[in-house]
Amino acid sequence: MSRREELERQIADMDEQIKNAPADTPQDVLDAWRNEYDALSFDLNNLYDDMEIDIPE
């Protein structure tokens, strides 16, 4: 599994976890999950694939 696929899977998992959190989930836990989601999204958005970038040698 490529790093991109792994990040996409982790983001989808975190999204489901946040959306399906029980109503009594503490706010600090939800905030931590959202921070993790944001960090994973940031990593994915800043990821580049070597095959997509034409780097002069």
Image (cartoon, rainbow, N blue to C red):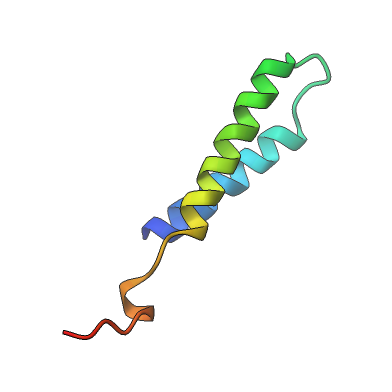
Q: Is residue 5 above or below residue 51?
A: above
| Residue for point 31% across, 73% down | 50
| Residue for point 80% across, 14% down | 24
43 on left or right of 11 = left
| Of 28 and 15, the residue lying toward us | 28
Toward the right, the furthest residue is: 23
Toward the left, the furthest residue is: 57
Toward the front, the furthest residue is: 56
Q: Is residue 28 visible?
A: yes
- Quadrant of the image for the N terminus? bottom left
- Quadrant of the image for the C terminus? bottom left
Q: Is residue 47 above or below residue 11?
A: below
- Residue 15 picture location, percent across and down: 67, 42
Q: Is residue 32 above or below residue 26?
A: below
- Residue 4 picture location, percent across and down: 44, 60
Q: Is residue 1 visible?
A: no
20 on left or right of 33 = right
- Residue 51 picture location, percent across and down: 33, 79
How many numbered marks are there? 0
| Residue for point 76% across, 37% down | 19
| Of 49 and 46, the residue lying toward us | 46
